Image: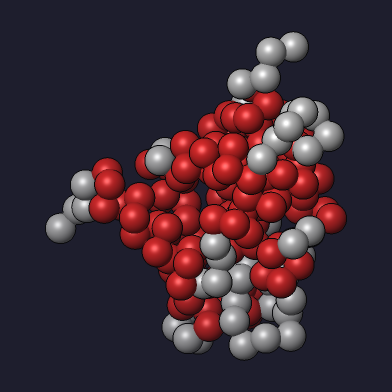
């Protein structure tokens, strides 16, 4: 059974929440990226832009795919060498970033710079998701969350008159 648009969106949101990522966490990242550029920015405005990003089917598909791969890696249900690459978040694996770039690309080139920056400094929830000292695997999730924030920040930037 294929889910309708709203069911798919809710499924993606539920998966994020089940993995410990809230809208507030992502809103903090958007705020971090845009506070210097958007006068009077509020977390509510950040959340509005996140909701718009999460309404995109390609974003929902990336969330569902990435989280499912992380879960399978935690359960040790992948074949070698993919199991080891995801379990250890191998630096040269790169497919996690490719999936994230699909999200970032939804709102144009500014998303790439936002994503590159936030992926490097790993503020807020990204530092927690990137902690490799837990039993959980977040090889895809940290990049997906960073990409959602970068796309929302880009959407926000596009809404500001120059």
Residue appearing at x 22%, y 52% in the figure: 3
- State the quadrant of the N terminus: bottom left
Front residue (pair 16, 138): 16
Give residue 118's position: percent from left, percent from top: 77, 49
- State the quadrant of the C terminus: top right
| Corner quadrant of residue 33 | top right
Give residue 64's position: percent from left, percent from top: 42, 59
Q: Is residue 56 above or below residue 25?
A: above
Give residue 153's position: percent from left, percent from top: 66, 36
Q: Is residue 112 left or right of residue 10?
A: right
Front residue (pair 32, 115): 32
Outermost residue on the front side: it is 40
| Corner quadrant of residue 101 | top right
Outermost residue on the top side: it is 162
Q: Is residue 130 above or below residue 107?
A: below
Q: Is residue 23 above or below residue 158?
A: below
Give residue 68's position: percent from left, percent from top: 44, 68
Front residue (pair 83, 58): 58
Q: Is residue 34 left or right of residue 121?
A: left
Residue appearing at x 47%, y 86% in the figure: 75
Q: In this rendering, does residue 21 appear at all?
A: yes
Residue appearing at x 41%, y 49% in the figure: 60
């Amino acid at each position: 059974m294929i889910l309708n648009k709203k069911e798919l969106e809710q499924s993606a949101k539920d998966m994020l929440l089940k993995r410990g990522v809230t809208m507030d966490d992502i809103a903090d990242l958007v705020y971090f990226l845009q506070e210097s550029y958007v006068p009077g920015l509020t977390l509510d405005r950040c959340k509005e832009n996140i909701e718009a990003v999460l309404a995109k089917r390609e974003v929902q598909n990336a969330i569902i795919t990435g989280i499912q791969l992380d879960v399978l890696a935690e359960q040790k249900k992948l074949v070698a060498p993919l199991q080891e690459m995801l379990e250890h978040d191998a630096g040269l694996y790169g497919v996690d970033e490719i999936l994230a770039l699909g999200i970032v690309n939804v709102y144009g080139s500014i998303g790439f710079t936002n994503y590159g920056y936030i992926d490097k400094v790993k503020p807020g929830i990204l530092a927690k998701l990137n902690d490799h000292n837990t039993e959980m695997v977040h090889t895809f999730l940290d990049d997906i969350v960073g990409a959602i924030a970068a796309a929302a920040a880009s959407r926000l930037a596009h809404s500001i008159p120059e």
